[in-house]
Image (cartoon, rainbow, N blue to C red):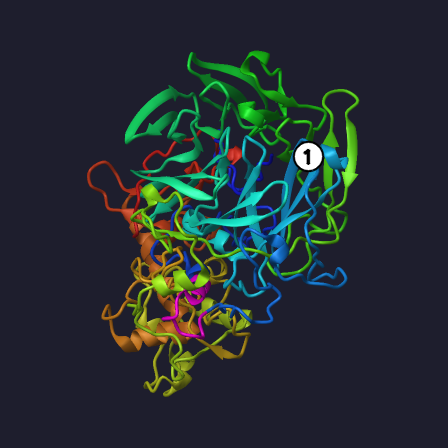
Amino acid sequence: MLRLRFLRAGLLAGPRIGRVRRPAGAGPRVWPSVVGLRPPARRRSRWLAAVTLAAWAAVSLSSAVPAAAAARAVPPNSSSSTPSPGPSNSPAGSAVRQGKSTDASLPVRAVRPVPAGDEVVDGRGDSDGWHLYAASSGSGWSWQPLATLAPVGIDPGGERWIGRQCMTGDGRYVVAVVAPWTVDNTPAGNDRGGIAYVIDAHTGAVRPLISGVSLYYFTPSCGTGSTVGLTRYAGTDEQSTQLVLADAADATVRTVQTLPGQYTAAVPAPGGGFFATSGDTIVHLAGGRHTVRVHTAGRPFDLVANAAGGVDYLVGTGRSSASVWHLDGKGVHRAGGGVFGQLALFEGRGGRTVAAGATKLDPAAGMVALTGETTPVEASSLAGTAYSPVPVQSPGRPAAARADGGALARTPLLLSTGQGHGARHVTSLIPATSAPSTAVFPPVLRDDGSIVGSSDAASTARGARPATHASVRAATAQFTSTCAVPRNNVNLQVMQPSPEDVDWAANLVGRSLLAGSYARPAGYANLGLPSYSPSLDFPLPAPFGPGGPSIPREVLEGVFAQESNFNQASPHAVQGVAGNPLIADYYGAGGGYVTGVTTPDCGYGLGQVTTGMHTGDMSYDLQRKIAVDYAENVSASAQILAQKWNELAAGGITANNSDPNIIENWYLALWDYNSGLHPNSGSGPWAWAGQTTLPTLITPTTAGRSCTRATATDG
């Protein structure tokens, strides 16, 4: 049994920012260093929410999209490093890569059955897919390849795959949710960018389940039998929650519940329906009824279904501690506690929750305590007799995997068996081979609860025919983007600037100096326009501008690092070479896998400028300049940021001494640039509080804080 976390929720008091737990296999994000920005929980319409996901998903799933989109679809007979799969229920039928282990890939071999006994499963990702490994008591706790998930038709452009998995309470199946690394770096991708599969825990046979589910730490969540819960957030800003109940035994979806608002940490309830968290309560959701089971003294997280018909869960109790609670038909009681960074709950056999890092665990709760290990635990067997610690950083090499498709992390998978004093520690290195690739693309769950590629409705999906890549592609409608400046226009190609180019423009624009001798000459960038000055096209509002305060270039460059990684053109274009404009969610997939289901974001270039960038919003000449000329994009971004500064100041929201020349004073304006601000309607201006209060993304340093004065906005 395993519970590999994508993003840990748990609320602890404290306003500090940082330390979001990363997915296994994910590389580090790059955040602006000058203001200490965190990745946003919400994004304004400019935010680079789904550009990468929508691009590769739309290309791989739709025959209607242009061939030069951001990622390539892999033809069935291509020679890609991801082989064409065999039958979805037979890994041995898949193509097998041969050769020696290299830094770029691992050789593969046919999977041998995992010997019977207590079993633990863990995973690692590289550019060839998400590799699952299993070890059992019957094999002497020796790791062996179990399966490799690499959805057919999706080529993430050399990026590493990330994933999370759990084992069902009956010990027969592993359910895994995977995605390319970039998908995790967008809010829409986190909400509905995951692809789910069912894997036989003994034979490694892979069956497609469903795609379009969330990448948060609670998806998937296995139940006490063969059931599994998956969560999806529809629309923008997690306005509604979809809870998917599936049966791993036959890899089918039983029901899909769509609920208004945000529910997190949903797990299948032993008696039917789901247990989930809503604010500081645990609720039971079944048959359209919402029943509050308990109010907690903090935000609950890490819910695990138990054999008593309830759930076990954690609650943050301080800056560095948490408590374990047991809920059953008789009520709720405290079962133990521990250090937050080490305390974790895992599914156990038959509903006996396995608790790692717990101290003074109450035997009456019926839990299994993992002891003798002081490091955070990544995976546990169902009986709690073996577990795998989180990989330890090797000397001179970070344990976290990179975003690119290099080798798997060179940290060993450690296995510790036994409990208490004298526990036996077994070191088992990650195998030098991986299992064959096998992953038919599953049906796609949409906002309305329908499943594209399935012949049956979601509520009667049992026995539905699994969707193939071709059937999903055929289900995708023709789509015309409403983004003003199109892709694949040979007359509107964008030169990729260098960091020095961006620094030059940010330095001048922040002081309103990109005019006069710095004006663009007539005919610049093949636009066919007369000479123009970016600082005059998008002047900074007072008090900024000539003779007034400036915007520090470090602040602007922080925005560009977060929004676009300093790209004005598609990331496929290297510096000094032309390519398509960088456009967020051009196909309107909204983080999903089918084009045209939502309004395209149309965020362009360095600053992901969306304001005015839909067809007809403003002068087409200005729109072309924003899309093509990096200096014009910098100027438009600076104007928006200065407007945000003024908007906050008008509402009485300021930082420190309100001097715009001081870098640290821009934090709130950057926050507003990301999320937007509601106007003062009598109770004060409201803004989205950001990732520091979302239960899907909360870290130990921010647990216990509530979402005060936080409402959704697209700014």
Q: Which residue is mark 1?
A: 116
Residue toward you, 685 or 78: 78
Looking at the picture, tell me which residue is in the foreground, 581 or 152: 152
Q: Name the kind of residue labelled 1 in the image.
A: Ala
Q: Residues within 10 Å of mark 1 (few under 14, many from 20)?
A: few
Q: Which residues are magenta?
A: 55-69
Image height check: is 468 above or below 206? below
Q: Is residue 532 left or right of residue 381?
A: left
Q: Position of residue 584 (x, y in %)?
A: 39, 63
Q: Decide: is 664 above or below 379.
A: below
| Residue 243 shows in this picture | no
Quadrant of the image containing the N terminus: top right
Residue 511: which quarter of the image? bottom left
Instruction: Work out whether 630 lies above or below 207.
Output: below
Image position, residue 180 (x, y; %)? 53, 56
The correct choice, above or below, for 433 with respect to 337 in the image is: below
Residue displayed at 34% across by 23% down: 292
Tell me where residue 313 appears, x and y as whole percent: 49, 25
Q: Is residue 248 visible?
A: yes
Quadrant of the rendered structure where residue 525 is? Answer: bottom left
Closer to the camera, 402 or 499?
A: 402
Relative horizontal placement of residue 45, taking residue 92 as reference (left or right): left
Q: Secondary structure at mark 1?
A: loop
Residue 62 among magenta residues: yes
Instruction: Say if the magenta span includes residue 699.
Output: no
